[in-house]
Image (cartoon, grey):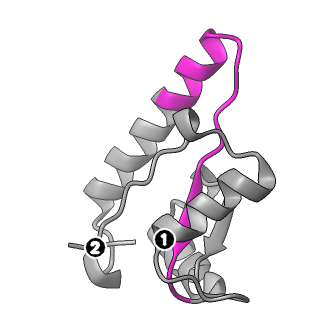
Amino acid sequence: PGQGNAPLTPERAAMLGGFIARWRAAAAAAGGTLEVCVLTASSPEVKTAALEAAGIRAHFDEVLSSSMPKKFASKGEYIARRVRKEGWERRETLLDDDAI
């Protein structure tokens, strides 16, 4: 959850949780919903455990992987496939990555 899988500080976890809560509230006020997922290039089980340890797993609907079971060249390629094959809306899909 932190940069390079470093532990997320309690302050940053609280800040992230606050952002997601406000985004969900704004979506609800507009009559919609917001689905927030984590997309990892590693094991979803490992990432889920890290999110749980940081106390923020409950903020996310799913933990997805761009390398399991099929490995994609990039997270962007994974998202493009979901747009094409599963109906993700381009204008509604945001990738926020902590990798530099």
Residue 15 percent location from the top left of the image: 32, 45
Reading the chain from its start, which is encountered first: label 1 or label 2?
A: 1
In this rendering, the label closer to the viewer, 1 or 2: 1
Q: Return the mark for residue 75.
A: 1
User: Is 87 on the left or on the right of 15, as rendered?
Assistant: right
> Dividing the picture into quarters, in which one does residue 13 lie?
bottom left
Would you call the spot at circle 2 few (<14 residues within 10 Å), some (14-19), or many (20 or more)? few
The answer to whether one can see residue 12 in this image is: yes
User: From the image, which quarter does the N terminus lie in?
Assistant: bottom left
Residue 58 is a magenta residue: no
Residue 43 percent location from the top left of the image: 60, 89
**Residue drawn at (49%, 29%), measured in percent from left and top?**
23
Residue 78 percent location from the top left of the image: 59, 69
User: Is 2 on the left or on the right of 36, as rendered?
Assistant: left
The residue lying furthest to the left in this view is 100
The residue lying furthest to the top in this view is 30
- Viewer-side residue, 78 vs 64: 78
Q: Amino acid at mark 2?
A: Ala
- Viewer-side residue, 11 vs 43: 43
- Label 2, secondary structure: give it: loop
Q: Amino acid at mark 1?
A: Lys
- Viewer-side residue, 38 vs 20: 38
Q: Return the mark for residue 99.
A: 2
- Label 1, secondary structure: give it: helix
Q: Return the mark for residue 10.
A: none
Would you call the spot at circle 1 few (<14 residues within 10 Å), some (14-19), or many (20 or more)? some
User: Magenta region: which residues?
Assistant: 23-42
**Residue drawn at (57%, 40%), measured in percent from left and top?**
90
User: From the image, which quarter does the C terminus lie in?
Assistant: bottom left
User: Is 22 on the left or on the right of 68, as rendered?
Assistant: left
**Residue drawn at (58%, 78%), measured in percent from left and top?**
66
